[in-house]
Image (spheres, rainbow, N blue to C red):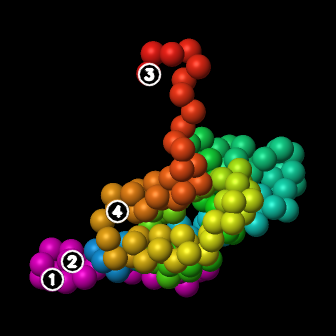
Amino acid sequence: MSELMSALDALAADDLHSLTDGQVLDRTAFLVQLVNRASAELTRTVRRADTTQAAERDGLKSVRSWLTGHARLAPVDASRILRSGRALEHFPALAAGFADGQITAAQVNVVAEKVGPGEVARAVEQGIDLAAFDQVWARVAVESPHQSLVAAVQAFEDALDPDGPEPDPRGGG
């Protein structure tokens, strides 16, 4: 890991004013991919800590509390990482694109927010092919604007519940 820190130190020492516009854009694309890969590795590591209840080593009941206390993450960020790690276990194509740096943490979160354990179980019960959605989501995430992934995840929700949401029993629309 010290090699990674040394590489980041070298990047930080670069004189950005000496770069051409093309070099700045190439560097930006590289850094986006690097951040995505680091986010994927963080998510994978946090998922392992979650499954092994590693936070108990420090006297905490959850990895979420460890992340907020020890890593000083905002609670919403800790929850997002945990939710994403859990979701990625069901979507290997999405996980692979994330690990390669082609898919962002925000894109993974689009899926993870809508497809939790309950939705996965309902999909299996209904015979919905999760692998097909996984492949499509990964392709859309890599090739299309962010909003296209939101629409693709909505297609899953529609397939899962073709009748739509139940009406509000209180009335009023």
- Residue in front for this viewpoint, 171 or 135: 171
Residue at left 64%, top 66%? 128
Q: What secondary structure is the magenta-colored segment mainly?
A: helix
Q: CA distance from mark 4 to mark 3?
A: 28 Å
Q: Amino acid at mark 4?
A: Ser
* Location of mark 2 (residue): 25
Q: Is residue 33 above or below residue 50?
A: below
- Mark 4 or mark 3, earlier in chain: 4
Task: State which region is magenta.
Answer: 1-27
Q: Amino acid at mark 2?
A: Leu
- Dot 1, how many residues are within 10 Å of its Cα: few (below 14), some (14-19), or many (20+)? few
Q: Quadrant of the C terminus?
A: top left
Q: CA distance from mark 1 to mark 2?
A: 5 Å
Q: Which mark is residue 22?
A: 1
* Location of mark 3 (residue): 173
Q: CA distance from mark 1 to mark 4?
A: 28 Å
Q: Where is residue 119 drawn, in percent x and y?
A: 66, 53
* Location of mark 4 (residue): 148
Residue at left 34%, top 62%? 148
